[in-house]
Image (cartoon, coloured by chain):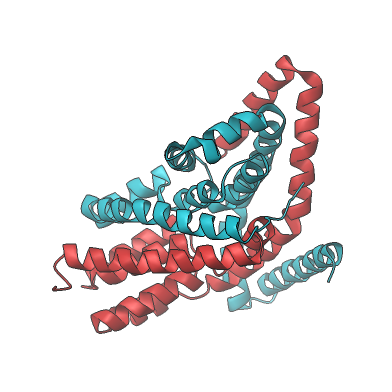
Amino acid sequence: MYKLYYIAGAAILISFLADRQKTINGLLIGWKKFSKILGTYLKLLIILSIILLISDQFIINYLGNQAPFIGLIMGLIIGSITMMPGFIAYPLAGILVARGVNYMVVAAFITTLMLVGVATFPVEKEYFGVKATIWRNIAGFIISALIALVTGILYGEVLI
Amino acid sequence: MSKKMQDKTNYYLFTIFAAFIFISYLVNFNIGKKIGANFMIFSRDMIAILPPAFVLIGLFDVWISRKSIEKNFGHSSGFKKYIYAILLAATTVGGTFVAFPVANTLYHKGANYSAIFVYVSASSLVMIPMSVMEASILGVKFTAIRIGVSLPLVIISSIILGDFFSKINYQIPEIE
């Protein structure tokens, strides 16, 4: 869990032995970047905590009782607007599959969860600008839809 | 709103939010307590990841020369840069939260648009521990399809977007 601290600690030590002044400069740069973005990350924390209120039950209900193509669209939309850590998302996906929900729908949900971040927009726009953020997310949405369709075809859920 | 004002608003907002959660626990307000529990999940992640990640980004900034980034992630690198971007993504701890600032730093050191787009998208697609968990719950076939189909598509779309953004001379904001 905290392994990144060990890595960063080791990096500081090595860097310090190699060049003291450079290390101090690097840490100052890191601190400056961190303090500039911290407020935005705090805002993101608020957004994410509220969005996760969309409960498992809600998602199971909405993705579970649909015709496949409606389910596909719902999966794409719910995956885009929500954001959850993998240890919540994957067990949830497992429940969906156990309930007989198509793999295509699960793929739509899981891939948009990864590739489309409506909730993370405030952070992404700081680093990429508004335009690039929007286009990257649109591309992610289209790619997710294609992945879901290919999944549906390869699992024999969509006949071509 | 200026950047500084915005930042101030964020801190105020956060203080109010923290007070709301605290009071929710005191008066046993269920929705507030649930938001509080969610907040713990995400903030634990961020505390574990962000401070050391920015230490590494700072050191990266002073030690890695512009030349080496241009050579490996810039115009002269050809297709190789996408392979490097995916390898870097697979080993980036913390997913997109870390990938955004890293991508920004890479860009200002001479990486191409297409390379950083591939890097950011791949960093949420191919996180190694997550993919292992996925395969164990949904099956290896599912994970193989997802990664196998998505990576080529991410590279293609990033090249298209990269061309577009170079053509319109887009500037990515600089966070220093």
Residue A55 in the image: state x and y as whole percent. 46, 74
Q: How many marks?
A: 0
The structure residue drawn at horizontal position 71% and vertical position 36%, both measured from the top left corner, is B58
Residue A24 seen: yes
Q: Residue B119's spot in the image, x, y percent?
A: 50, 47
Q: Write the residue at 51% across / 46% down.
A: B115
User: Which quadrant holds the N terminus of chain B?
Assistant: bottom right
Q: Identify the residue shown where x is 73% and y is 66%.
A: B18
Compared with residue A149, is residue B158 higher up or lower down, i.e. above or below? above
Q: Colour of chain A?
A: red
For this orientation, the residue located farthest to the top is A17
Q: Is residue B144 left or right of residue A134?
A: left
Colour used to depict chain B in the structure image: cyan
Residue sitting at x 62%, y 35%:
A5
Q: Which of these two is toward me, A128 or B114? A: B114
Determine the residue located farthest toward the front in the rendered image: B167
x and y percentages locating residue A70 in the rendered image: 31, 83
Quadrant assignment, res A13: top right
In the foreground, B150 or B30: B150
Q: Compared to A13, does A84 lie above or below?
A: below
**Residue A102 percent location from the top left of the image:** 23, 71
Is residue B77 positioned above or below B95 on the image? above
Say if residue A120 shows up in the picture: no
Could you tell whether A108 is left or right of B12 in the image? left
Q: Residue B58, relative to residue B145: is it above or below?
A: above
